[in-house]
Amino acid sequence: MTEWMLSESDGYDLLSKYGIPTPKYKIVTRAEDAGSTAEAIGFPVVMKIMSPDIVHKSDAGGVIVGIGTKEAAQSAFNQIVANARAYNQNADIHGVIIENQAAPGLELIIGGKTDPTFGKVITFGIGGTLVELMKDVTLRILPIDEDEIRRMVTDIDSYPLITGYRGSKPKDEECLIQIIKNVCKMFEDQKDLREFDINPIRLYDSGACAVDARIIMDDDIHLLDVVELEPVPPEYFRPKSVAVIGASDDTSKMGYAVMHNLLHFPGKVYPINNKRDTIQGLQAYPTILDVPDEEIDLAVITVPARHVPGVMEECGKKGVKIAVVITAGFKEMSEEGAMLEERIVQIAHRYGTRIVGPNCLGLIIPPIGLDTTYVAQSPNPGNIAFISQSGAIVNTVVDWSLTKDIGFSLVVSVGNQADLNFFDYLRAAAADPETKVIIMYIEQIKNGKAFMEIVSEVSRHKPVVALKAGSSARGQAAAASHTGSLSGSYDVYIEAFRKSGVLLVHTLTGAFLAAEMLSHPKRYPKGRRAIVVTNAGGFAVLSSDYSERYGVKMIDLPDYLVKELDSFLPEFWNRGNPVDLLGDATEGRFEKTFEVLAKNDALWDMCFIVGFPNNILSSEQLANQILKFSKSTDKRIIPTLLGGASMDRGRNILHAQNIPSFEELDMMYRVVGRLLYQIYRVKAQGVY
């Protein structure tokens, strides 16, 4: 037996063992026993069919509630059994369970599932029959402490129903907290408990009762342990010599593109081709073993998959530290390819060679001029490390970055991750002094617990931004419980990122805007309080809308601050926040306003500045005042220079001083809203 569901009685017994309140119950197998049993338990009672072959009892007519007499109990027994037979004539019926009918209360759900990547996950929220319609739930990856349980309870939108809503009495929140603690202990203790939901658990003014529970066991659960991984020495990512195995003069070949991109590498480059004496102007060698240098730091392999094991053997003998295997045709293709991949890993490890890929775009380290990929144009050096499970996305991002003046410290297409994986690249980026922020494009993580441990450590020192693919429900297997459907794989990734200090975004543009914000020395806003300064009334109104939508808290201006601004602003300024300096605002008007705000920066945590093209104030003048303002306060200054090319000079001035400026008002508030959500758990609508 691999998987089975506990009977209702066994489920109640397991819950009771861990101090989770359940109804009194007894199972009967004859109608004549139903009346006396119901009377002994105490009316009213609920009666339900007991059959491992009938999961959804209500659908089968296997549940009758509100039974108040002995005669009604006997009649209900016969009706339930008859309904069950009609629903499934081959069902194995164990009897009918009679239990106390719990009093009405606030119906909640507490559930759990074993996620294949991150292990045991607990879910809490509004339950009952509307659970999947409302979807007002939160989840956490175990283990969690009591403080996290309390945050979990307050996170649901319906939390006011627990504290007392519109005159209703508060529910027993402390009892609920204790029950969730007990459920977590049960889930962690029971190693073969795979998935469950307690739905509903009714919460009262005093106490609670688990009315129904579906508990699925599995004696074949395999959870990956957190493994100690040997970090890759930093010098491996600073090669002084590179060999291209499969280098070519044929422009249609991969070996040509890779070789072409390495021509600007300042170290030694050796083309390997057993049919030519020279490749792209450089002397070629039949094999890597024929290269006169004693050791080669890095090899790029572009030959067909069937030749890679032999080539890897030669790389090992030559002392190659890292082999970048661009070639496809391994485990992503077939069982035979998987065996081939395993073989090259075994060969590499025998010699101490590490592998990037296979089936990858390659590795780019712009600060040292290394590009082992076939991108059309190498990216500029910068301070962002980009680690991606998609080569096509790397290609696109690199091309896009050249038009946006975005530079990279490291770009990795991880491919099949046969050897080096996300953990290794995260550690390499964390140890790299050039890297200020890390962006990851993730499709799937193999060992979630190990990932969380490593990225938690990395994110303490350097911001980590993640774009996770696979948020749609299409193609997912049907869940065996409410919890399974409510807490899908994507939701667990979101929680893993939150718990690990990773900033989740949903667009590539958002990822790089967030990265640019986080690469600034001030990094995060110190709180949610914001003030907006603009010379455009329409954008002031939109700023109010967007700030509310994305969880930014706009402060009210105190009287003394309004009075001080009154001393130099036009008589008809709006005297509110956003501060509208009007369309004829000069550089001097912005300067004086910024001076007042800097002097009073205890009132706010971030200042949004919104400018637009006009003939009175150039983008350069506004940018210079923003720089001066930023230097006068330790709070975050977040500018948006709206418009086209006429605002580029101002944007370039800010960019040169590492102050990110946005070109779209909505996107600015979206990015900040996502940051606030991550840091302060601020709920917002539509945060990207």
Image (cartoon, grey):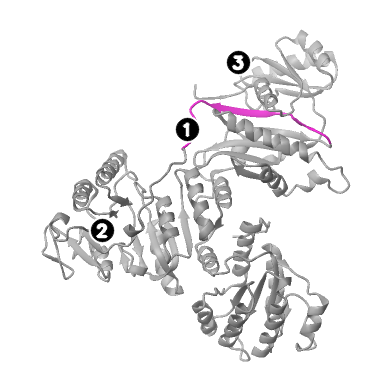
Disc 2 crowd rating (10 Å Cα; few below 14, some 14-19, many 20+) is many
Using residue 284 as the reference point, say whether residue 129 is left or right of it. Answer: right
> Could you tell which of marks 3 and 2 lies nearer the N-terminus?
3
Name the image quarter holding residue 62. top right
Magenta-colored stretch includes residue 219: yes
**What residue is rendered at 52% in x and 63% in y?**
511
- Note whether 218 is above or below 355 in the view shown: above
| Marks 2, 1: nearer the viewer | 2
Using residue 605 as the reference point, say whether residue 419 is left or right of it. Answer: left
Residue 446: x and y in percent read 44, 44
Q: Which residue is mark 3?
A: 92
Q: Which residue is mark 2?
A: 297
Q: Secondary structure at mark 3?
A: loop
Disc 1 crowd rating (10 Å Cα; few below 14, some 14-19, many 20+) is few
Using residue 281 as the reference point, say whether residue 1 is left or right of it. Answer: right
Towards the viewer: 154 or 560 = 560
- Note whether 291 is above or below 378 in the view shown: above
- Note whether 336 is above or below 257 in the view shown: above
Any part of residue 464 in sight: no
Distance from the alpha carbon under mark 2 to that under mark 1: 38 Å
Q: Which residues are magenta?
A: 206-224
Asked whether disc 1 touches disc 3, contact meaning CB atoms under 8 Å apart, the reply is no
Residue 262: x and y in percent read 26, 67
Residue 667: x and y in percent read 59, 68
Name the image quarter holding residue 481. top right
Name the image quarter holding residue 371. bottom left
> Could you tell which of marks 1 and 3 lies nearer the N-terminus?
3
Distance from the alpha carbon under mark 1 to that under mark 3: 30 Å
Q: Which mark is residue 651?
A: none
Q: Secondary structure at mark 2?
A: loop
